[in-house]
Image (cartoon, helix red, strand yellow):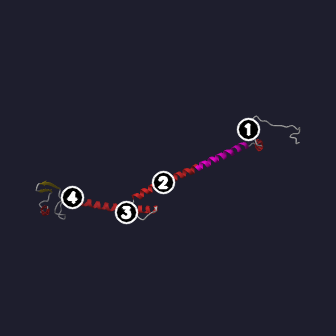
Amino acid sequence: MFPLHQGDELCFNMSSNPHQQHSIPQDLILAQYAALHGSDTATKMENGRRRNLISMDNNEVARDQKMMHRNIERQRREEMTTLYGSLRALLPLDFIKGKRSISDHMNESVNYIKYLQKKIKELSAKRDGLKKLSNLSFDAPPSESSNKYSPISSVTLHPYPGGVEIVFDSDFRGQDLSPVKSIASVA
């Protein structure tokens, strides 16, 4: 019918390399072209396959990064919810009353902090004032403008079957003891 070669002989090329037996004619043409032009096209084709594998690995890496990002974000939201609940639990009911949103609670938290700071300043001023009064009344020497009675250094109570003995230990410097007498007579 159709001759394969000029001599009507049937020829087969058998190679000792098993990888060349399954070569596609296009690969053979490319390999021959590469051999003629000095470039390694077969290596480029293998690199293309490697790039394809690398791109598959990159897709897996990208997917893993997305999953890791989602997990981190989920943990952050859970922590924020826990912290928000703790903050809400610390606020008095007067500051939460009628408020439902997180932003309202945050604003009320700021208001509560300002309220506490104001209260601390007021109490500090009151404490300092009381300290000054106590230091002036006990540490100041008697003067003409101050109270004519010096403070009592100590008071001792001794119970007796018929009453109580009250002992005042102080230096009145010869002043009238009528206020002490009136207190003792009332008792």
Reply yes or no: does residue 97 show up in magenta.
no
- Tag 1 secondary structure: helix
- Which of disc 4 and disc 1 is earlier in sequence? 1
Q: Give residue 9's position: percent from left, percent from top.
A: 87, 37
In the rendered structure, which segment of residues is drawn in magenta? 41-63
Inspect this view and state whether residue 83 appears.
Answer: yes
Cα gap from disc 4 to disc 2, whole angstroms: 58 Å
Mark 2 vs 1: CB contact within 8 A: no
Residue on which disc 4 sits: 138
Between disc 1 and disc 4, the foreground one is 1
Residue shown at 29% from the left, 62% from the top: 126
In the rendered picture of this protein, how many numbered marks are placed on residues?
Answer: 4
Looking at the picture, how far across and down is residue 104, in whole percent? 44, 63
> For mark 3, what is the residue?
115
What amino acid is found at the position of numbered circle 4 in the picture? Phe
Q: Main secondary structure of the magenta part?
A: helix
Closer-to-camera residue (158/99): 99
Q: Nearer the viewer, mark 1 or mark 3?
A: 1
State the image coordinates of residue 58 (x, y, percent, origin top left): 62, 48
Q: Residues within 10 Å of mark 4 (few under 14, many from 20)?
A: few
Q: Choose the circle earlier in sequence order: 1 or 3.
A: 1
Q: Nearer the viewer, mark 3 or mark 4?
A: 3
What's the amino acid at mark 1?
A: His
Q: CA distance from mark 3 to mark 4?
A: 35 Å
Residue occupied by mark 1: 19
SS at circle 3: helix
Marks 2 and 3, how far apart at CA: 29 Å
Sequence-wise first label, 3 or 4: 3
Please name the residue shown 32% across and 62% down the image.
122
Q: Earlier in the sequence, mark 4 or mark 2?
A: 2
